[in-house]
Image (cartoon, grey):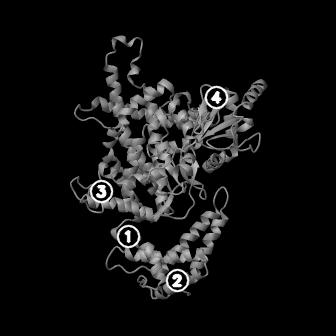
Amino acid sequence: MVGVLLRTQLRWWTWLRNVPGPPRTSWCLGNLPAFLRHNAMPVCRAWATKYGGAVRYWAMFGEPRLMLTDPLALDHVLRKQAYAYPKLRLAQRLIGGVMGEGLLVAEQAVHKRQRRALQPGLNARAVRRLHPMFTHHAEALAQHIHTIAQSHGTLVDIYALLSAATLDALGEGALGVHFRALQHVQTDPHGNASSAHPLTAALDRTLRMASRPGRWTMVLDTATLYFPWMEKIPIGLASRRFRREAQVLFDIAGDIVQQAKTRIQDEDANETHPDILATLLRANQNAHKAPASKDAGPRSVLDHATLTDAELQAQVSTLIFAGHETTATQLAWMLLFLAKDPPRQQALYDAIEAKRLAMGLQAQAQSGAPADADTRMLTVDEIESIPYVDWCIHECLRLQSAIHTTSRTPLHDDWIPLANGQYVKVHRGMIILIPLTSICTMDHMWGDDPLSFRPERWREPMPGQRLFPGHHGLAFLLGPRACIGSAFAVAEMKAFLVSLVSHFIFEWDGRPIEPKLWVVARPHDPVRGQDATTMMLLRMLPAARAARRTFSTYRPLLEQGKKVPAVGPNPLDAPTLEIVKAQWKKARLAKDSDKATLLGGILTDLQYAEKTKMQPNQKPPSIIKMIQKGIKKRTDAAKVYRNAKPAPRMDLAEKEEREIAILQELLPKP
């Protein structure tokens, strides 16, 4: 054992000696503590900015690793020599443990055969036929949100709902089954949501166990580099609990394959199922029936791009994960970006509305409307012709892709070319990190504001577009191992985005949301300690959108002393409104930005409520009730922050309490 360690240390000592990089923080842990954070991408971006496109960093016990952001090096590793740089053994164990030996794990000839088998069901033509199904599930989600808003209010965890809805769409479009996961989502008035569906629950538990970071996990992972037999130690991915949860997923996948086989056998020749799994099974049948050519030699029938039953089961598990988890995560980030940027959310709605009006349709679509009605949904061609929808999708995939990093290891020693004309020598077994999100936020590729959500940047060509064609940055990787379902994912995201933005106004509720880098970059609420994207949803009515358009002009009018919205039925509303106006102006003069923002928001909300009254004879809104609701909301938030795990967020709690004190001063004294 000591000999193995010494031999490995001597070998590592010669690796990457001339490649620049950050100094190690310790010999034991190297630079790895930076990767224990929820989001290590800023660290990788800072290293690339300081040291260049090839960076040496340190893992545990003096192991040097290579981080690549250089475009020419990425083209070499991911495209030209893709099969000479397979995934790490650890990544294969992780993905294979959750999804089986499917396309994401397969290498070399097996990967090529599996990809050929799956390609017909995932090409652009096949995906276009699925657009009505995507729209159906997007509208089902919108109706479900309406129901929640009526019973619980408008604070919604959109991530949990998107996860269920995209699973339903994946089930029907890819597997030919109806999961009905959306019906199993449980919500409460505080915006929390969770799924009781057995598939989503098992998938979530499995991912949590597979992706749980920690120093002991790092120690074990590093030890397996020295001693591969340690992979069999019954902890982590080899634990009985993990295998039990993963088996639930495999059993469900097996049942889906058997159901699909039965459907294919019973289907009418004139009416075939369009889902991906059915297409794959029909191709399997045709390949087995095809006679072997005379010069086939000893080749197996599997050379016709067919899959074994075990491989079919693994592909189903892969489709369930890769086909819904990543899409739900991407859509959650998209809606969060739009919620934080109301002008661009409005621009997206305006672009959709303009397209509908140009087609002679009503501004607002109606779910279930006939194809010849003027309230019908937009077709796939009509959505494809809206540039701003494309720009929003591209920008979200660039700024926060669901797949944030990938790693490779060379099968043999190699020289990797760099854009500056130099080369980096890599050795067999070396670990190469490719931080996808960091690469897609480099200013020399994407403009002066790469960390900002600005869809308009896609109007003009950028260096990043030229270096990484496909208009999605590196969200779907490059080369023969690029995501085979990218067309499916983008088409589904567009259908959901157009439908949801047409129905609702999304508003950020102010809770901090940050990416938690699991297998995917799930949105994470660090205060509540859970994966969530909680936001306020306001029902979209023509008057509501009209009011939103006036937001940018309202406050200047108020500064000029122009007429304010009507006050409510309470006789104390009028004097309370004058108090709010006076305090708002006083705070602005005193340059108390926090207080001015708080009071200005109340005045803006008051006008918004006035312009979105449901009935003509409805009474004007009460500013007193609005202030009371604001106090209750902040009281609940302060309680959450004080009880946050693993540590209370006293700074946020105190901010909420300061705002409570300001609001209480505005209320009439008893």
Number of marks in picture: 4
Pointer 4 local density, CA inside 10 Å: few below 14, some 14–19, many at least 20 = some
Pointer 3 local density, CA inside 10 Å: few below 14, some 14–19, many at least 20 = some
Whether residue 567 appears in this view of the structure is: yes
Q: Which mark is residue 429?
A: 4
Q: Secondary structure at mark 3?
A: loop
Residue holding disc 3: 367
- Mark 3 vs mark 4, CA separation in Å: 54 Å
Q: Earlier in the sequence, mark 2 or mark 1?
A: 1
x%, y% of residue 497? 40, 54
* Residue type, numbered disc 1: Ala
* Residue type, numbered disc 3: Ser
Image position of 99 (left or right of 640)? left
Residue holding disc 2: 580
Between circles 3 and 4, the one closer to the viewer is: 4
Q: Earlier in the sequence, mark 3 or mark 2?
A: 3
| Quadrant in the picture for the C terminus | bottom right
* Residue type, numbered disc 4: Gly
Residue displayed at 34% across by 41% down: 127
Q: Which mark is residue 544?
A: 1
Whether residue 100 appears in this view of the structure is: no
- Mark 4 vs mark 1, CA separation in Å: 59 Å
**Quadrant in which residue 88 is drawn:** top right
Q: Are marks 3 and 4 in contact (CB under 8 Å)?
A: no
